[in-house]
Every structure is written in structure tokens, then in C-alpha cells.
Image: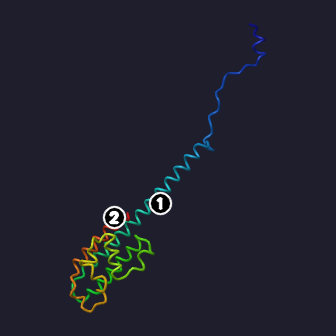
Amino acid sequence: MNPTATTALDLRDIHGAASPALWPPAPGWWVVALIVLALLLMGAVWLHRRWLRRRDRNEILSELDALSHCSSGEHTADCIARLSALLRRLALRRYPRAQVAPLSGNAWLQFLDDTGGAGGFTRGAGRVLEDGAYRPDSGDVQIDPLLQLARRWVTHNLEAGA
């Protein structure tokens, strides 16, 4: 081969392609980043809702525990009224307002039985919720069976709502 012919071709050495730049990322990485961000956001919302449910549950149970210090006596009517208000607040959270809000008297007790009372409100200790807060002789009422029935109803509805 003629040495002058090779120099005339002006050949260069083979070089590989330049490495890709780190920024901006390829479109696939943008999709992955959006998916990860959406999953993190959904997880944060789920954790926040779970925290709110647990906080509400603990508040309701602590209020019920505070009512367990009531004993039969002069403050029984107040305890019955507070217990009834607690049950109604939980029922309004758990069930549609249109279903719960208009209930009173025997219809309210029947609703409590239908949603976890198992007959204890219309035929048992819960019967006192109908008018116990307004009776002058409510001091004769045994509050412990009523509180046990209310605790069963509350725990049933808190577990079902979780």
C-alpha cells in the first residue's frame, strides 16, 4: 500500500457515542416519578384518615369511660343524657343523617337495636334512654348495665365503620 494514499484518506480512530446527560430525564422516568408521587400521596391520605379514625375512636371510648364513673344516684339523669348524646353523635357519624336525625323515642331505641343492640335497647337496660334523662326518679336506675350495653353498641359500630 502506498503510504501517501493512507494519509490522503484522513482516517480517524473510532469513538463511542457520548454518554447520555442526566438532566433532563427520559420520558419514562417522568412517568415513574409521577406514579411514585401519586402512590406517596395516596399513602399519606390513607395514613391521615386512619389517624383521624383512631383519634375519634379513642375520644369516643374515653368519653364512654368517663361516663362509667357515674353511679346510681342524683346525677344519673345527667349521665343518661350524656350517654344518649354520645350514642346519637356516633350514629350521626356512622349512618346517614336523614336516617338518624329524625329518630326519637321508641324509633331511636329500635334503630339502636337494629344497628348492634340486639334487643337490649327496646327490651333491656337501654329502655331508660327513651325518657330517663327527663324523669325525676331516674336515680333508681341501674346505670352499669346501660353502660355495658352502650359499650357493646359503640365498639360494634366503631369496628364496623373502620
CA separation in Å, label 1 and label 2: 20 Å
* 159 relative position to 125: left or right: right
Q: Is residue 54 above or below residue 34?
A: below
Please identify the quadrant where the N terminus is shown.
top right
Q: Nearer the viewer, residue 72 or 69?
A: 72
Residue bearing mark 2: 159
Q: Position of residue 67 (x, y in %)?
A: 28, 79
Q: Tell me where residue 137 sits by quadrant.
A: bottom left
Q: Nearer the viewer, residue 122 or 79?
A: 122
Q: Which residue sits at x=55%, y=46%?
A: 32
Residue bearing mark 1: 45
| Label 1 CA crowd tier, 10 Å (few <14, some 14–19, many 20+) | few
Q: Which residue sits at x=41%, y=76%?
A: 100
Q: Is residue 63 above or below residue 12?
A: below
* 97 relative position to 14: left or right: left
Mark 1 vs mark 2: which is more N-terminal?
Answer: 1
Q: Which residue sits at x=26%, y=86%?
A: 76
Q: Position of residue 158 (x, y in %)?
A: 34, 67
Q: Tell me where residue 86 sits by quadrant.
A: bottom left
Which marked residue is nearer to the observer: mark 1 or mark 2?
2
- The local secondary structure at tag 1 comes to helix
What's under tag 2, amino acid-wise? Glu
- The local secondary structure at tag 2 comes to helix
Please identify the quadrant where the C terminus is shown.
bottom left
CB atoms of marks 1 and 2 within 8 Å: no
